[in-house]
Every structure is written in structure tokens, then in C-alpha cells.
Amino acid sequence: MKNLLILFIFSFLCFSCKSPEARMPESVQSGSFLKASAERNKKLNEREREQLQHIIKSNPDKAYVASKSGFWYYYNTKMENDTIQPQFGDVVNFTFNVSNIEGTEIYPDKVKTYVMDKEELFTGLREGLKLLKPTETATFLFPSQKAFGYYGDEYKIGTNVPLICKVTLNTITQKND
């Protein structure tokens, strides 16, 4: 009887611990989610482009320049003589403020020191700094994908918010090779 009980318990443990069979993943061949997402992004980009173009047209006294990177800017102060611009690894000190496209200030003037392309900084601002020379000031219009995009900044800037940033490049300290 004792052997039968041990056999029963052993059998129960062996068969009850059987792991479930793996299920095969379902694959969707249509790509409908990706198509819908791409369509939403196209509409978002077009709407933001129209909003930024409206700002540009509303300020005919400003000489806006379209960057190769997909944002617009104009110089508040331009230096014709100096030719130095930030390069990879240079340390830059700059002052900037951030507003939404209605002009409401999100972040007032902040002074920041940044090592070019070696620290985190949102894409548009990083690319915009590369266009400036010391003591130049420019105002940038960044579509949301060049600002904080879908995620925002987790503090004051929400999802898909285009931004206006006024930036003054104070100094450049060139890297020592």
C-alpha cells in the first residue's frame, strides 16, 4: 500500500507539472497598423508645417531660413566676421528660452553648458547650435519631431508640441585633440 501511495504521488507530480505547450504567435500580414501610424504622422507633420508657415508669414520683417534638418530660424543678432562654429566635442555655453507656437513661455532664459554631440539635448536645439557663432542669437521654429516628439519632456512640454526657441551662443571652447 505504501508503494502504491508513493507511485501515485510520483505520477501526480510528474504529470501535473507538465508545462503548457507554447502557442505560435499570430502574424499580421496586412501592415494596417503601420499604414495607419504613417498616415497619422503625415497629417501631424502637415498640420505643424502649416502652423509654422503661418508664423513665418505673420512676421514678414524676419528673414527666416529653412534649415536642411527640417526647422526654420532667423538671426536676431548675426556676426559676419567670426567664422568659428561648434564642432563635435567642443564645449558651448548658451542662453535659451522655450515657448510654444502661441508664444507662451514654457521655460524662461536658462544658461547651459553643453559638450557638442556628447550629451543629451533635443535634436533641433543640438542642430541649431551648430549654425551659430559666438555672440549670435537666433530664433528657431522647431516642429515637434525636432523638439520632444511623442514623449514630451516629462515636465512642461506635452506630446507633439512644436516649439519656438530663442538661443544665444555665448562661448565656444574648442576641444583639445
Image (cartoon, grey):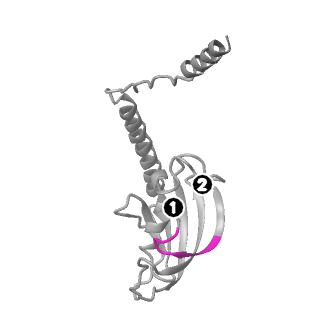
Query: Considering the image in quadrants, where does the N terminus appear?
Result: top right
Q: How many marks?
A: 2
Q: Position of residue 66 (x, y in %)?
A: 37, 62
The answer to whether residue 74 of the structure is visible from this angle is: no
Q: Splitting the image into 4 quarters, where does residue 29 fall? A: top left
Query: Considering the image in quadrants, where does the C terminus appear?
Result: bottom left
Q: Amino acid at mark 1?
A: Phe
Asked whether disc 2 touches disc 1, contact meaning CB atoms under 8 Å apart, the reply is yes
Q: Secondary structure at mark 1?
A: loop
The answer to whether residue 10 of the structure is visible from this angle is: yes
- Quickly name the residue at label 2: 153
- Which residue occupies the foreground of this view, 135 or 61? 135
Q: Position of residue 98 (x, y in %)?
A: 59, 62
Q: Position of residue 103 (x, y in %)?
A: 60, 56
- Which residue occupies the foreground of this view, 102 or 71? 71
Examine the rendered structure and indicate whether residue 119 appears above or below residue 135. above
Residue drawn where x is 63% and y is 55% of the image: 104
The answer to if 117 sits in the magenta stretch is: yes
**The furthest residue to the top:** 1
Span of residues in magenta: 110-119
Instruction: Answer few, some or many: residues within 10 Å of disc 1's Cα (few below 14, many 20 plus, some between 14 and 19).
Output: some
Q: Splitting the image into 4 quarters, where does residue 60 fall? A: bottom left
Q: Main secondary structure of the magenta part?
A: strand
Residue drawn where x is 52% and y is 65% of the image: 121
- Quickly name the residue at label 1: 122
